[in-house]
Image (cartoon, rainbow, N blue to C red):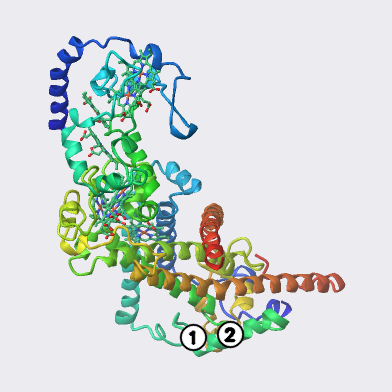
Amino acid sequence: MKIQGLLYASALTLLLPLTLGAQEPPNCLSCHADKDLKKDLAGGKTQSLFVEQKDYLQSVHGSLSCTSCHTGITDAHPSDQPGKVDCGICHSQEVEAYKKSIHAQVFEADPATAPDCLSCHGTHQIQKVNTDKYKRATLDQCGQCHEDYKRTYLDTYHGKVVDLGETKDMPLCWDCHSAHEILPASDPQSNVSKERALATCLYCHKDATTKFAQYDVHSDRFSVKKSPIEFWTYLVMILIVCFAFGLWVPHTILWFVRDWLENRKKKKDSGSNPPSETGGGA
Amino acid sequence: MSEVAHTPAQAGSGPVETREILRLSGYQRFIHLLVVIAFFILAFTGIPLKFHEWAWAKMILSALGGYENARYLHRFGAILTFIYIGLYFAEIAYRFVIKREKGLFWGPDSIIPRVEDVIHVAQMVIWFCIGGRRPKIDRWAYWEKFDFFAEAWGNFALGVTGLILWFPAFFTRLLPGFAISMSTIIHGIEASLAVCFIFFIHFFNAHLRREKFPMDMVIVTGRMSMHEFAEDRPAELERVQKDNALFWHQVPPASPVLAKVGRTVGLILLVLGLGISVCITYSSFAEWIPRVIRFFS
Ligand code: HEM
């Protein structure tokens, strides 16, 4: 990560003269700070073109000029077609990794279902990734589309501790799956494939063995198909609970009622006869 | 009742009213104290992890000073548990091997269930339903035996699965990976069961019923009044009197300070324990009811 930081820094110094030299003709925010600036889309919908300056300046890219990302802006703006932003100009490593991932493949086929850079990082408010806030946010991000995996993750020790607010040493989704080069477990290249899962665990569990890595961190005790062993264990435990309380709750309630009845009877008796019990007491 | 007042207590010294029966030795009460301490530590540091989504769990953890503390305390409680299990078996071994005590594993003085216990259960149920006479209970009542073995089983299940969760990499050298997920499930549910059982059932059986309310001091002082003894354990009294051994069971009363401290601490723990049990029950039902509804609709 330190190396990557250096790369950014050098990228930045390389870019700096460029951006300074090519001071963009119009001040973008003179128009785009307008909350009502919209673009008409097909089908009567509109897209807001508003850019919140405060958020932008606080983001990691706040020191960049708009055109370092929006490279397609010409003097003819707004009547030109600026085109999509390519994060790869500066983050080629992440883009290369992402392109190999299952997400990129699915995104190409159907952009609505899979994430690209923007779904996970945002556009103008991109924050540093090694903060607690972002780390916790990724849980919900991945969880949006992988609800079952989020639930089962929160059922493991790792997830419980993270949910309790301790993200320091605990693995989040991307510690095991990587953030960009995410691949299905069936792909041997995947961090969580049979071949490589052990290496992933070893990153933190120095004494891990093959069998340790076979522990299914997404086992689902509610699914008999996916995790039969956990399902039956869970069911047997529930039955033991039902057995114990099925015997003893009635026992306790009946005892309570009988106690109360006896007590009342005794009070009545001692009301008619003079009290005979003197000894004992305490 | 009136029979009790006339019970002839032939032996012993001092006035009849102040003589008490020694039920639990100091060693036994010391072990029970360890059980109570370890159990409370384990329950209050483990349960919030299982119910991490709930506000009450987060409150308990912040009262304990965060998750890291709970983690260490849980392990401390576990070590304490293994210590008292060791002490318990050491005493049993001493009494069996060295003192050659008879009736440790069989007979009326033993905690091991007997045929009489089944009869007592039936008699008790009859008493619940139509009243009359309660079964004549001997040294250990069947509910005490059940509590004992429930605790023993619980400690076994929690101890084994807890060790697997503590040293997962070590145990999976021998065991398959799913031992870890099984252990998580067993440990979590068995712990919830143990806590709720102790506070809803054991506390009622032992402390909250009318004769004992609000607390049976025998676990603190080790002593029981003659009057209570005769009412609660008539079979044992008969047996002891037949052997003319009542004298050997009688002791002077315990210090009132001990009883006072015991009662105060006991009541505080009872409130805490009932509180967490209510939370566990509520959260378990809240998790389950939607699931059951979804299943049937
Ligand atoms: C007797 C030996 C025991 C050992 C060695 C043990 C050990 C452990 C370990 C290592 C964990 C994993 C979480 C952590 O590290 O904090 C755990 C979790 C837990 N323990 Fe224990 N424990 C023991 C007894 C108990 C008892 C008596 C209770 C309750 C009365 C209890 C309740 C729990 C609960 C509720 C969890 C959370 C389970 C979950 O994540 O679903 N434990 N225990």
Residue A78 placed where, x, y %? Answer: 35, 17
Kindly tell me whether mark 1's CB lies below 8 Å from ligand 1: no
Q: In which quarter of the image is the N terminus of chain B?
A: bottom right
Q: How crowded is mark 1: few (under 14 residues within 10 Å), some or many (20 or more)?
A: some
Whether residue A176 sits left or right of residue B185 in the image: it is left
Looking at the image, which is closer to me, B23 or B291?
B291
Which amino acid does the dot numbered 1 rest on?
A: Pro
Comparing marks 1 and 2, which lies closer to the viewer? 2
Image mark 2: chain: B
Whether residue B157 sits left or right of residue B245 in the image: it is left
Residue B259 placed where, x, y %? Answer: 55, 57
Q: Are marks 1 and 2 on the same chain?
A: yes
Residue A67 placed where, x, y %? Answer: 26, 18
Instruction: Say which residue appears at 37% left-offset and 52% top-offset.
Output: A154
Q: Can residue A170 be seen in this view?
A: no
Which amino acid does the dot numbered 2 rest on?
A: His
Point out which mark residue A61 bears: none
In the image, is residue A163 above or below residue B17? above
Specify the quadrant of the image occupied by residue B82. bottom left
Specify the quadrant of the image occupied by residue B135. bottom right
Could you say whether the residue bearing mark 2 is in a helix, strand or loop?
Answer: helix
Looking at the image, which is closer to me, B179 or B293?
B293
Whether residue A18 sits left or right of residue B124 in the image: it is left
Whether residue A250 sits left or right of residue A112 in the image: it is right
Residue at which label 1 appears: B108
Residue at which label 2 appears: B120
Report how far apart the C-alphas of labels 1 and 2 lie in the structure.
13 Å
Residue A46 placed where, x, y %? Answer: 46, 29
Instruction: Say which residue appears at 58% left-offset and 85% top-offset.
Output: B120
